[in-house]
Amino acid sequence: MRVILFLFSFVFFSCIFKSEVQNPSNNFLWKLSKDDQYIWIMGSIHMADSSFYPLALPIQNAFHESQVIAFEIDLNEEQSVENPTSYFFQNEEDLESFLAPKTYQILDSILSSWALSIQTYSKLRPWAVAAQISALAISRAGFQAELGIDYVLMEKALEEGKEIIGLETSASQIEALSSPSDSAGVLYLEKTLLEIQEIEETLQEIKIAWQTGSTLKLLKLLNLEDSQEKADLFSQKIYFERNRTMAHKIQNLFLENKRHFVVVGIAHLIGEEGSILEILKENGFRVEAF
C-alpha cells in the first residue's frame, strides 16, 4: 500500500471490484440500498486542487437531497490529542534514538531540502512525523486540504443547514497508527520516505484516475490488491480494521429515518477484499454505481 497517498484517506492529518462495485459512471458515487431504504456514499480525495470542481451533477443532486452528511470525522468539532504520549516522546526519548540511523539520515536530508530542521520533529513519534511530512509533500505538489472534497462538502453542508456527523474521531484515527512499540508508525514513516521522491508524478496520476473514475488505476497506484501489502501491519490497522468499523456505523444509519450522504476516502471503497462496499455487499446491501 502506498502510504503517503493514504493520507488522502486520513482526514484529521490532512487538515491539522470488480463486477457489481465497478464504477462505470466515473463519479465514485454509489447508492447503497436494502428493502425500501437507501443512502448515498462517495469516495473522496482529502487534499485536492481547483480542477476537481465543480463536482459531477449526480454527486451534487445526491448531496442536496440528503438531510445528514456523514464524514470520516466531523471537522467542525474541536480536534485535540487526548493522550499526548501517543503523539510526543516523553522524558529522554527522541526521534533520533528511536529510528534506524539510515532512516533518520534520509528524513534529515528530505527536511533539509525543504529548508526545515529535523530538530523541529525531534519529540514527535514516527507516525506523527510521517503524517506531517506527507501533508507537506502533498501540499508542495499543489494539493490543499481546504480544497479537499470533504472540506468543501462540509462547508456546503453548513451553508445549507444540514446535520453533520462523524464515523470516526481524531482520537480513533491516531489510535490506528500509535502503539506502545510504535511498530506501525515506524513502518509508516519508512514507507513515506521511500515514496516522497516520486510524489508529484504519482499525485497527478491519482488526480487523473479519480477524475476519470478509473478504479483499476487507483487500485494499482495505492497497491490495494497486493497480497503482501494486505498482510502488513500498517494495512491491517489503517485499512481493514477501520473499514470494518466504518461499515458497521454506515449500516446502522439505516436504523434512522433520515436520508444520509456518506463521504469517505476513496481508498476505503475500492478493492475486492475488505473494502467498505464489499463488506456491506456481504451483509446483504445492494451497491449501485452512479
Image: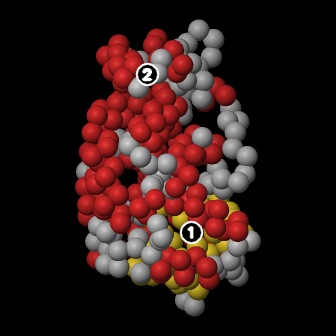
| Residue 115 tag number | 2
Relative to 75, residue 37 above or below: below
Residue 282: percent from left, percent from top: 43, 72
Q: Amino acid at mark 2?
A: Ala
Instruction: Assign a secondary structure to mark 2.
Output: loop
Asked whether residue 107 appears in the rendered view, the answer is no
Residue 40: percent from left, percent from top: 53, 76
**Which residue, as the protein is rendered here, is positioned at the far top?**
92
Q: Residues within 10 Å of mark 1 (few under 14, many from 20)?
A: many
Relative to 284, residue 11 above or below: above
Instruction: Assign a secondary structure to mark 1.
Output: strand
Residue 61: percent from left, percent from top: 54, 82
Relative to 133, residue 279 above or below: below
Q: Residue at x 29, y 48 (%)?
A: 202
Contact flag, marks 1 and 2 (Cβ < 8 Å) = no
Q: Residue at x 59, y 65 (%)?
A: 153
Is residue 12 left or right of 7 when viewed as pictured? right
Q: Quadrant of residue 24?
A: bottom left
Q: Residue at x 27, y 46 (%)?
A: 201
Q: Residue at x 34, y 30 (%)?
A: 193
| Residue 178 tag number | none
Asked whether residue 154 appears in the rendered view, the answer is yes
Residue 207: percent from left, percent from top: 35, 58
Residue identified by numbered label 1? 262
Is residue 163 left or right of 150 when viewed as pictured? right
Q: Quadrant of residue 51?
A: bottom left
Mark 1 to mark 2 CA distance (whole Å): 39 Å
Is residue 259 left or right of 93 when viewed as pictured? right
Q: Between residues 289 and 185, which one lies in front from this camera angle?
A: 289
Q: Between residues 113 and 23, which one lies in front from this camera angle?
A: 113
